Image (cartoon, helix red, strand yellow):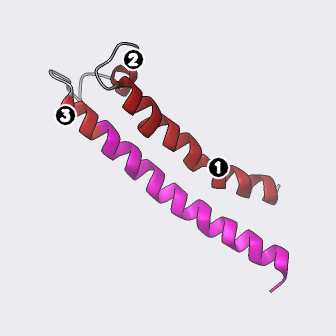
Amino acid sequence: MSKNSSQLLNTLQLAAVSGIIGPIIFAVVVFVLGQLRPNYNHFTQTMSELGEVGGQNAMVMNIAGLGLLGIDWGPILLLMWKTF
């Protein structure tokens, strides 16, 4: 196996793991913050309300929820860049 195909395989594996773990972390953060916020209903309110300005745990949602999800896209974007 050549060095380039080995690197591409490693990037593909990292992207696959990121694609599985990232959404799970995001869902857990949204669920936990929704439980911590009084009168929050996951069915009738949007996730954006958890990160709104002045919200009870806005910083946690914006960093742990959205920030980590954005970082999680890194390996996937790297794979796309290497492939195309």
x, y percent for residue 24: 38, 52
Q: Circle 2 is placed at which residue position?
A: 52
Amino acid carrying label 1: it is Gly
Binning the other alpha carbons within 10 Å of mark 3 as few (below 14), some (14 to 19) or many (20 upward) gives few
> Which residue sits at x=24%, y=31%?
34
Distance from disc 3 to disc 2, alpha carbons, whole Å, reads: 16 Å
Q: Which residues are magenta?
A: 1-30
> Which residue sits at x=35%, y=27%?
47
Above or below for 66 versus 72: above
Question: In which quarter of the view is residue 82 placed?
Answer: bottom right
6 inside magenta stretch: yes
Distance from disc 3 to disc 1, alpha carbons, whole Å, reads: 29 Å
Binning the other alpha carbons within 10 Å of mark 1 as few (below 14), some (14 to 19) or many (20 upward) gives some
Q: Circle 3 is placed at which residue position?
A: 35
x, y percent for residue 15: 60, 60
Task: Work out whether mark 3 precedes mark 1 in sequence or the reverse, and give the earlier one.
Answer: 3
x, y percent for residue 63: 46, 34
Task: Work out whether mark 2 precedes mark 1 in sequence or the reverse, and give the earlier one.
Answer: 2
Task: Work out whether mark 3 precedes mark 2 in sequence or the reverse, and give the earlier one.
Answer: 3
Question: In which quarter of the view is residue 55 placed?
Answer: top left
Q: Secondary structure at mark 3?
A: helix
Amino acid carrying label 3: it is Gln
Q: Secondary structure at mark 1?
A: helix
Residue 74: assigned label: 1
Residue 46: assigned label: none
Secondary structure of the magenta portion, mostly?
helix
Binning the other alpha carbons within 10 Å of mark 2 as few (below 14), some (14 to 19) or many (20 upward) gives some
